[in-house]
Amino acid sequence: MVKKSTMAIQNQLAQLGEDLGFRAVMEYSFESIIGTYSPRYDVVWFLNVEALKVNSLSNVKLINEHYLPFAAFEVEGSTTSSKNQLGNIGNLQLSPCYYNFMVVNNAGATTEIDTYRRGMKIVRSMQRVMGERQLFFLDSSTIEKMPIFEKTTIGHLSDGQIHGTRLKGSGGEKKSIGVAKKMLVDLSKTKLHIDYDRSPDYFKWVYHIDQKYQQVRVTSKTKYLMKQRYTKSPFPHVQGDVKSVRDYYYVPKIDIACGFDVQGGFVQFLHFLANQIGEDAVHFPLLIYVADKMEESLYFPLLGIEIEMKESKHALGSLMNLSNFHYVGWLVSPKVMEPYVSTYKRHLGMQNVHYIDLEDYL
């Protein structure tokens, strides 16, 4: 039975979702998407994407043909154990939603008013161990008094045409160019923004954090910033100053990226959270980025597509990139790669990536 304190927060989150323009449902389970064990999430927000005409795309699973699982919430309304909070993180890792939230009620703890501190430690640790995703940790006091937000809307709809020109495929080969062109027959029926060789926005967010919070060294007379440096060569030892995100991170380019812009209420809500949670926002790069850059829209990476013409370890790298940075990923490759995808899905949890038979596009 749901505790009254938890129910109160659920009701508040459900109302907030409706106010932001989502369809909000309490106690929701994605049985048709997740499988055998399907957690029951305290609140889920669904975005109506009917205008994008994506329900015909393979493996882009919508609810009632119109609703995209957008944000899932796990709530602890009173005292809870660390293992309960670990379980919440595990459930949110299974969530098909791109945005995920844990909400606790620190003041409502009856035995040990320490729920927030322990929860934040757990989130820090698990994001390191399990890999970062858009998971945010909040205390319910953060959302008690909120301004009136606009409705969340989908930005300018595309004409379904690809942006840019692709002159060569992965590793310099050219056969995949023809495959990509044939795929556009299906993709052009949607209203998604379609790009060749698009890099994930994630690295803009983390690089911004790196630049903003460079290590500060203080002496009795002066304070100065330590410049980020990277090693060009271990022997002879040569270093250089970090001048761009690509000096410090591997930033992939996805063969074909399909997405849309989210505007209005949800973006305003993220601005609000960044200001409300103060210094703890540093653990959530997206919050810092949207607040500092005064972003008014967010790109939603609905579908990433990597095209591989042969069996190779290169294709496994494509699989990793698709899983980490997209809502749904297609690895278009020869039949021999299908077991690779199945193994990665099963053992590495890459449930959002799917094998597409290359022969279908030749």
Image (cartoon, grey):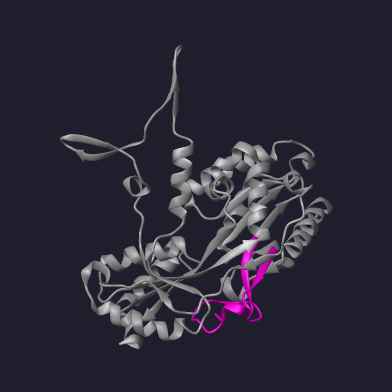
Q: Is residue 88 magenta?
A: no
Is 282 above or below relative to 12? Answer: above
Quarter of the view holding residue 50: bottom right
Quarter of the view holding residue 219: top left
Q: Is residue 51 magenta?
A: yes
> Which of the image's four quarters has the N terminus?
bottom right
Is 250 above or below relative to 215? Answer: below
| Residue drawn where x is 50% and y is 69% of the image | 259
Residue sitting nearer the eye, 81 or 360:
360
Quarter of the view holding residue 196: bottom left
Q: Position of residue 173 (x, y in %)?
A: 22, 73
In this rendering, does residue 35 appear at all? no
Question: Seen from this angle, which residue lies furthest left?
Answer: 236
Q: Position of residue 124 (x, y in %)?
A: 54, 43
> Which of the image's four quarters has the C terminus?
bottom left
Q: Position of residue 127 (x, y in %)?
A: 51, 48
Is 269 above or below relative to 57? Answer: above
- Numbered label tally: 0
Q: Is residue 129 left or right of residue 70?
A: left
| Residue drawn where x is 27% and y is 65% of the image | 313
Question: Seen from this angle, which residue lies furthest right?
Answer: 4
Q: Position of residue 132 (x, y in %)?
A: 49, 52
| Residue drawn where x is 80% and y is 56% of the image | 7
Q: Is residue 259 left or right of residue 37?
A: left
| Residue drawn where x is 35% and y is 82% of the image | 181
In this rendering, does residue 152 appear at all? yes
Residue sitting nearer the eye, 212 or 336:
212
Question: Seen from this angle, which residue lies furthest top?
Answer: 220
The magenta span reads: 44-72
